[in-house]
Image (cartoon, rainbow, N blue to C red):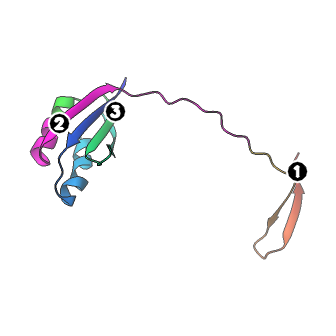
Amino acid sequence: MQQKIVVKVSMDSDKKTRKAPKIAVSISGVESASFVGSDKDQIAVTGEGIDSVELTSLLRKKVGYTELVSVGPVEAKKDEPKPTLQIDPYQYYYQSYGVPYYYYVY
């Protein structure tokens, strides 16, 4: 089962900002890590079988103060119907030398 872990990290330098997601992805079971929140000071980590304590302690050692915000299942995306593209039966495309040619779509 996929889970989502949100961790708040205090990053005072640009180097630490680039370093934090790389550290999070290095843990086994992690599929993705991205910045979330209004100040981009939180990292959302998604994956399967992630040890949240290991993630938090590793980020504390290598980046700085880290706080575990939430742990929970990944929200399922709702499938929205894709809009259909209606094609005109008489279409034309330009060839490489600029002269259009026509074809009929059945």
Give the structural element (helix, strand or loop) at label 2: strand
Q: Is residue 11 left or right of residue 34?
A: left
Q: Which residue is mark 2?
A: 67
The tag on residue 89 is: 1
What is the span of residues highlighted in magenta in the rendered image? 55-84
User: From the viewer's perspective, is residue 106 above or below residue 91?
Assistant: above
Check disc 2: other Cα within 10 Å, few if <14, some if 14-19, many if 20+. some
Give the structural element (helix, strand or loop) at label 3: strand
Q: Position of residue 71 (x, y in %)?
A: 28, 27
Q: Is residue 28 visible?
A: no
What's the CA distance linking mark 1 and mark 2? 59 Å
Task: Report the residue at 69% width, 40% height from top.
Answer: 83
Give the label, 3 or 2, closer to the camera.
2
Q: Which residue is mark 3?
A: 47
Task: Report the residue at 88% width, 50% height from top.
Answer: 89
What's the CA distance linking mark 3 and mark 1? 46 Å
Q: Amino acid at mark 2?
A: Glu
Q: Position of residue 7 (x, y in %)?
A: 23, 37
Q: Position of residue 13 (x, y in %)?
A: 17, 58
